[in-house]
Every structure is written in structure tokens, then in C-alpha cells.
Amino acid sequence: MLKREPEGGYTVTVPSLPGCVTYGDSIEEAVEMAKESIELYLESLRGHGEEVQTEEGILEYSL
């Protein structure tokens, strides 16, 4: 989820991944940061032997 911040920039949260939150000064930067945050989050889960559970087993994003 992409949210424009009143002071400028954009915050991105990933509802399927609790605590996965990032920020960018522009929409483009926020999307790139979100991709990186998701990758790091998933790597961390795998490193701890955990799996990501979604309704369909698929994570997707759209703009």
C-alpha cells in the first residue's frame, strides 16, 4: 500500500508481510525500496526457516 505523506514522500506498507514498511521521496523510489524491502524480508524469513503464507501462496503488487 502506497501512502503520500503530508510532509512529502511516500510510505509503503506490505499487509501480507507484517512490519515490512519502507519510504521513498518519489513514487518510483518508494516502489524500488518496497521491492528491496520485500526481498530482504523474505530472505530473513527463509534464514529463520519460516515460510510466507498467503491465501494463494503468491505475493503480488500493483500500482
Image (cartoon, rainbow, N blue to C red):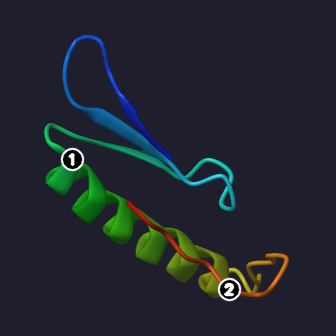
Tell me the distance, in whole angstroms, between the alpha carbons under discs 2 and 1: 24 Å
Residue 7 at x, y percent in the picture: 22, 12
Number of numbered discs overlaid on the protein picture? 2
Name the amino acid type tagged 1.
Ile
Counting residues from the start of the chain, the first of labels 2 and 1 encountered is: 1
Residue 19 at x, y percent in the picture: 61, 47
Q: Is residue 15 above or below residue 4?
A: below
Instruction: Name the quadrant containing residue 59.
Output: bottom right
Q: Name the residue under label 1.
A: 27
Neighbor class of circle 1 (other Cα within 10 Å; few <14, some 14-19, many 20+) is some
Q: Position of 23 compared to 42: left or right?
A: left
Residue lying at 21% horizontally and 47% vertically, measured from the top left: 27
The C terminus sits in image quarter: bottom left
Farthest residue in the top direction?
A: 7
Neighbor class of circle 2 (other Cα within 10 Å; few <14, some 14-19, many 20+) is few
Name the amino acid type tagged 2.
Ile
Residue 34 at x, y percent in the picture: 36, 60
Q: Is residue 13 above or below residue 3?
A: below
Residue lying at 19% horizontally and 20% vertically, measured from the top left: 8
Q: Nearer the viewer, residue 1 or 52?
A: 1
Q: Mark 2 points at which residue?
A: 58
